[in-house]
Amino acid sequence: PYYPSTFTRNPASQVSNTPAANIVRQEGSYEIKLAVPGFSKADIKIEINEDQLIISAAEVKNESDPNYVRREFNLNGFRRTFRLHKNANTNAMTASFDQGILTIVVPHREPETRKIEIL
């Protein structure tokens, strides 16, 4: 038998197109992890624009159109932006992708020290 109340949605729950992120401060770097299940490495784009780290993905097209009884997640595109610290070494950043988790390591650059000559 079909029990409609079994499939009703809790109004407090929301479908989000923003992937969850964990950021860990490590010795000499920050590690950003995004949960992006269902996306492939090729779907994800990582850009740096001035002091912004921009992570995005286009919608993943599904060839079949299932007749959903309940749908709590989707593969719509997303865009996450993180402001980078002025000491972020953007030239040494790395990214990896494993089992739906995107990991970006943002190393710190040592602050510049200048000596000023006294005239």
Image: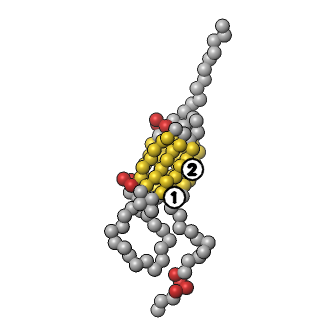
Picture layout, residue 103 above or below residue 89? below
Which x, y percent locates residue 23? 57, 50
Inter-mark Cα distance, 2 to 1: 13 Å
Q: Residue drawn 49% across and 47% down?
A: 54
- Residue 24 in the image: x percent, y percent? 57, 48
Q: Is residue 35 above or below residue 13?
A: above
For the C terminus, the quadrant is top right
What's the amino acid at mark 2? Ile
Q: Is residue 105 left or right of residue 42?
A: right
Image position of 65 with respect to 60: above or below = below
Q: Is residue 98 visible?
A: no
Numbered label attached to residue 8: none
Q: Position of residue 83 (x, y in %)?
A: 57, 44
Badge 1: residue crowd in 10 Å (few <14, some 14–19, many ≥20): some
Number of residues whose C-alpha sits closer than 10 Å to that of mark 2, classed few (under 14), some (14–19) or many (20 or more): few
Q: Residue at x 62, y 72 (%)?
A: 12
**Residue holding disc 1:** 19
Query: Can you tell which of label 2 and label 1 is closer to the viewer?
Result: 1
Name above or below for residue 82 compared with residue 35. above
**Is residue 62 among what the camera can see?**
yes
Residue designated by label 2: 23
Along the line of sight, the residue nearer the viewer: 115 or 49: 49
